[in-house]
Amino acid sequence: MTEEVTDPSVAEDGIDVSRDSPLNGPGVAPDPAWFEQAASEPPYARHVLTTPLHLEAADENRTNSWTEWAGYTVAQVYTSVEQEYDALRTRAGLSDISPLTKIRLAGQEVIAYLDRLLTRSVADMDINRSARAILCDGQGQVITEGVVFRLDEEEFRLVLRSSTMDWLRQSAKGFDVQLEDVSGTIAGLSLAGPMADNVFTLAGVEIPADLERHQGCWVELGGMPVYLSRTGMLGGCEYELWCDPADASIVWRRLLSAGQTIGLRPIGAAVRDIARIENGIALEGVDYQSAATAVDPSDALSPYDLCLGGCVDLDRSVFNGKLALKKIAESGSTSALVAFECDLTDASSMGPVCNGEKLVGRLTSYVWSPTLQCTIALGLVEASALGASDGFSIKTPAGQNIPAKLTKRPFLRFS
């Protein structure tokens, strides 16, 4: 008698249910349990740290391409870089920015505290306004930077690339101020592109006609309260949406559904990086290291090195790093983060920056720009070399010197 062998991985209806991970390819629909942490699971055993939009991203991701951002798993490419870039620059693109650190600051002395902390004052900021925020150490080196929002008379929010809560709490000693990391209670989305306003109209969102860059307001989207701000690093018409994590998937689906008629696409980290370089934005951990984590002191930069001197107000009372920044401003920065264009299709072959035969710096970010049809790069070069407007080149690993044009940031100009 022959014993019948049954494959336990195949259900009676013939559907393969052997997958134990949504990353193993098509088969069954994603099970939300795959992304939930078991109550008994220790924190160090967690393999995937997910944003509130992870299931939505997984449903849209056709490439199974993922990357890490601040410990979170986010989509690298949803369909293709070409399709997503085209949508962002000609129509609209939607992306998940939930991994950003969000810090709530409130209290009677919150303005005094922030004025001591940041390189420029927040005292004159109107409610629902935002500004570039730079935090320096005592040597005038950048610890982190991002955006500060004024939400009320005595309430602000810092949105940063990295968490510096220990340093912020240490700096708050002596101030009547409350600090809270609210990153887990606020989901973030970015909607950008020349037709972003059309997407909101199709989604039934009423945006004030006079909402300017760096302003914010509360809107209703699909019955959900959303804080909408004219902020972002992709360039052009861009909005960021901040909402409760429980509402994030509703907001995401509502926008994608409404924007289908105009070609809205979700965009991943790969296209976001192309866009931020085109916009000339330096990125912590890529173009420079935080002064709090840099092993080599030369990897930490001042705001003047990053060409962000306009965000430093030396004509006001004491703030972190003021004396050091004043000396740098008087003597001049020794290096500068500048922009280059070069006629090179293979960005992976980029190398050191030269002026004539002299090595004068290094590239920190580079990418092929589909709009400009050339390789664009951010590079840290010796300030003494900037007296020459030409003569720059990029040395390739093969020893070739590729001519490079020194240009202004941002690379792309938007109306």
Image (cartoon, rainbow, N blue to C red):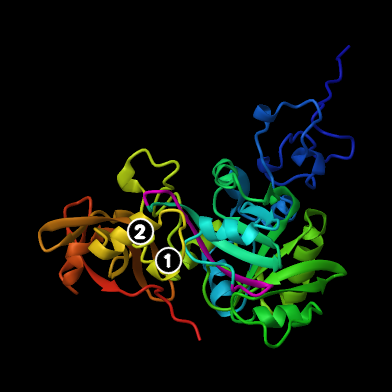
In the displayed structure image, the side of residue 118 where residue 36 appears, left or right: right
Q: Residues within 10 Å of mark 2 (few under 14, many from 20)?
A: many
- Give the image location of residue 91, x and y in percent: 61, 78
Q: Is residue 414 above or below residue 139?
A: below
Question: Is 33 rendered above or below residue 82?
Answer: above
Q: Can you identify the residue that label 2 sits on?
A: 325
Q: Residue at x 58, y 56 (%)?
A: 113
Q: Which residue is found at the position 89% from the left and 40% from the top?
A: 13
As for residue 322 lying within the magenta part, the answer is no
**374 up-or-down from 14: above or below:** below
Residue 275, horizontal then vertical, whole percent: 49, 67
Around disc 1, counting alpha carbons within 10 Å, would you say few (fewer than 14), some (14 to 19), or many (20 or more)?
many
> Quarter of the image containing the N terminus?
top right
Q: Which residue is mark 1?
A: 312
Along the line of sight, the residue nearer the viewer: 327 or 9: 327
Type of residue at label 2? Leu
Q: Which segment did they paint magenta?
A: 124-139
